[in-house]
Image (tube, grey):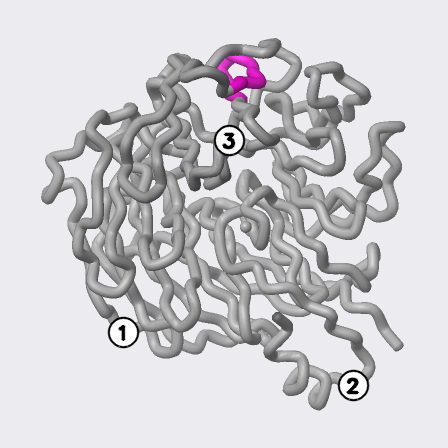
Amino acid sequence: MPPIFLASILLTFPAHEDPGEDWTRWGGPARTGVTTEGGWRVEGERLWEKEVGLGYSSVVVCGGAVYTLGFDEKEKVDRVYRLDAETGEVEWVHSYPAELMDKAHRGGSLTTPTLDGDVLYVASRKGQLFCLRAGDGEVLWSKDQRKEFDLELPTWGFAASPFVDGDRVIMNLGRVIAYDKKTGEVAWKSEDNYGDAYATPMDFEYDGEHSLAVFAGDGLAVVDIGSGKELFHKKWKTRYDINAATPLVFGNRIFISSGYGKGCSMVELEGGEARDVWSSKVMRSHMSGCVPFGDHLYGFDEDILKCIDLDGNELWRERGLDKGALAIADGKLIVLSGDGELVIAAAAPKGFEVFSRSEVLDGGVCWTPPVLSGGRIYCRNQAGVLACMDHRRNE
């Protein structure tokens, strides 16, 4: 949500193992914040640090390259970066006009790029969509989606990242729109507009059909991924219409969660209806969503890290990490606290067992989930500092 760069790295750095799993999209390989990568150390050291502009965009990593974006307040542009994963050196930059959009927060970029083979898809908070050649940043095609589809800009801008499925790239803009990923031609668009779009969608199989779960301001919609036809719709209204967490799918059930006191629900799709199996305020996902592991969910209930089971029972809680974000790898939580502390702990329902803690970012809120790829953990704050921590195992 394929360690093709192993040879070059190992020749240069023979003291390291680099088992590596690419992280090419929001949420990593499984789109859930979970990676199967193992063989990394819980203790790490800073490898490099880079200024990448203001915002909350995460990174994608593949083939020894790191991609992200951020806002340049002086030049009033967003910059898309390709960096060398080992050194942090800039390999290319693509810029486009942008605005800070700092209402009730510090502003900057919101979406995460999506890498698909040799192509990078980038969405702006104003509704632009760019298809870039990953090797050099050349624009292959672009769309001004707000203008083309007469879309209303959400209060905080569009925040859903591009979603690639087969030969299409799909955008949650309230209205769900699918394009031919090579040409940018419209393949389909949903009939309805589901409201302010902050959450990246999730695909899954339902009743033998490939489907897409879309979480937006009006609630949860499930559409046929091949046509955009609505299959289910469940109202779920939150203050300010902020439903920002990626929906998580468990068979014919979908977990949704929202902040501002709203809470969470396990929704079951059955007989043409979407109904609550249970709903609760045990998890109120504000800035980042939950990550599933085994039969449990790990996530921030506002500013409290919790573990809950799939029936909504709280198993433990941990305070003091502010409104952070997390990923899971090799049975371990990789937690970036809201103020920049990297915590490695057990992903286990029995309790919060810490393996290591380190201050990696100083200043600027940290709402962006950390990313593990190739034994390196990437941490980013809103102020635009991207830190790469080396957790590769020494021989």
Q: Determine if residue 141 is in view.
A: yes
**Which numbered disc, 1 or 2, marks the residue that appears first in the sequence?**
2
Q: Amino acid at mark 1?
A: Glu
Q: Nearer the viewer, residue 225 or 385?
A: 225
Question: Closer to the camera: disc 2 or disc 3?
Answer: 3
- Left/right placement of residue 365 relative to residue 107 reads right
Secondary-structure class at tag 1: loop
- The answer to which image quadrant residue 313 occupies is top right
- Which residue has dot 1 on it? 138
Judged by its main secondary structure, the magenta piece is: strand
Q: Which mark is residue 252?
A: none
| Percent position of residue 280, x then y | 61, 9
Residue assigned mark 2: 14
Any part of residue 200 in sight: no
Among the two numbered marks 2 and 3 on one chain, the one whose residue lies closer to the N terminus: 2
Which quarter of the rendered picture does the C terminus lie within? bottom right
Spatial separation of the CA atoms under disc 1 and disc 2: 34 Å
Amino acid found under the numbered disc labelled 3? Pro
Indicate the position of residue 124 as horizontal and vertical percent values. 29, 48
